[in-house]
Image (tube, rainbow, N blue to C red):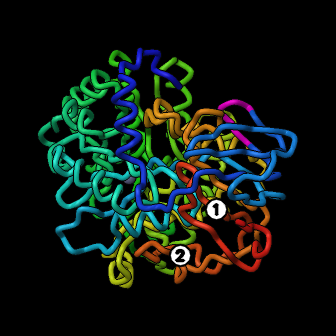
Amino acid sequence: MESGKARGISPRALFCALFAASPTTIPHMTELLLKGGRIIDPATDLDRTGDVLVRHGVIVALSDTPLSSAENTFDCEGCIVSPGLIDIHVHFRDPDESGHHQETIASGSAAAAAGGFTTVCCMPNTTPAADSRSVIDAIKHRATAAGLTRVFPVACGTIDRRGEVVAPILELVEAGAVAISDDGDGIADSDLMKRILSLVAASDSVFMQHCQDPTLTRGAAMNAGALATRLGLGGWPREAEELMLRRDLTLNRSIAARYHAQHLSVVESVIALREAREAGQPATGEASPHHLLLTEDACGDWNTLAKVNPPLRTAADVEAIKTGIADGTITVLATDHAPHPAQSKETDFASAAFGIVGLECALPLYREALIDGGVIDWATMLAMMTCEPAAVAGLDRLGLGRLEIGTPADLTIIDPDAEWIIDPATFLSAGSNCPFAGREVRGRAIATIIDGHFTSRQIGPSVEGRAVVR
Ligand SMILES: [Zn+2]
């Protein structure tokens, strides 16, 4: 949903932003022809079989009839050619002066590329937190050096994410932050939140809220209910999410900042977001793979891999999120990729860290929940992974999230029927905390391309011999 505000950003600033986020270490390929794939571009309602020609990193031709051979040809028959996938909610733990994590922008970028993602937005709960120009600069620098994914930083709403002092939001946006969030925590203080929303509106950025009323979740480890009681674990009430979301939407009524609710987990949040959107608020929301496929039952044997924030809920909540996706209330799919070292999970449930890794298995999990589940089709699902998240984070202004002549050749080649088994031991992410280990899934990104260069190519049993570059 658009705010309707003019987007005052100069062509030169656009170019600089895109250039800064462009990987530089990939070998240059002048010309690349993607042959015979099902080209889907949700942004332009394109869905047809044909060829895509890339020259000097830009899409120069789309054709129903075969184009003549180029310098490099990639056979896409039986595959989907999509705009590069975008995940606006990942944790790369970099910088990390705490020494508690192993993921870096380099390993996270490799994981993103392997999962089919060309662009990610990384959350600011780093050490130090992303509340200064120097940290934003460091993230951009490391992302460019890693050279595998466009990484756009999200900056803090408050200094050190403490929820006490408003961060220099205008300066942080000017430095390159594409969104503002204290993710990991919600902004509890209503007056502070109001001021932050005003600054976000003034900077034409977006606020991404982690909706959690902290006064209701002290000591909470999993969804409040009979199962938590039986396991002797602190219960996380569903109201903790709905209360903050409804408060924000109420505060934002007169401010009309772009507002994005992260990782929705309960029925009531979907209803609140639907009402706000129907009333014309520039509010959006996202769903995560685990909240679409798992319920609190996954915590039943004290499985710490199923400990996430917000917690896994009930089957009725899963259905409500799917309904919200089907009716367009929820427009974005995001992983909340949150790597943790093994020892953070190999402990008792109450002490274990919250979070799972998602980048390398998100695509088939979304397929299972949404396409196999009869909720939406491929084009709609890809919209939720390309043009819709691009619009939320303002990346559409850089030409990202679409597949059109003249746009950067960020592309994902998907074998929709590749069958494989999720094995976290093979992940390029430094984290392997994934409750989907051993799951048989369908659908895989077999190649990821940025600016016309391959950042990942999967050669597995199901795709070997099909995807050949010559
Ligand atoms: Zn969060």
Ligand 1 within 8 A of label 2's CB? no
Bounds of the magenta span? 40-45
Q: Does 110 appear above or below 260?
A: below
Give 285 or 152, whichever is nearer the viewer.
Answer: 152
Residue that mark 2 sits on: 300
Looking at the rendered image, the disc whose residue lies closer to the viewer, 2 or 1, is 1
Res. 44 image quadrant: top right
Say whether residue 34 is left or right of residue 14.
Answer: right
Q: Residue at x 50, y 62 (%)?
A: 27
Residue drawn at the location 27% of the way across and 50% of the way down: 214
Q: Is residue 265 visible?
A: no
In the image, 392 versus 235, the foreground residue is 392
Res. 75 image quadrant? bottom right
Residue matched to label 1: 447
Q: Are marks 2 and 1 in contact (CB under 8 Å)?
A: no
Gap in angstroms between the C-alphas marked 2 and 1: 37 Å
Rendering coords of residue 305 (x, y %): 47, 75
Locate residue 253, reporting x and y percent: 38, 19
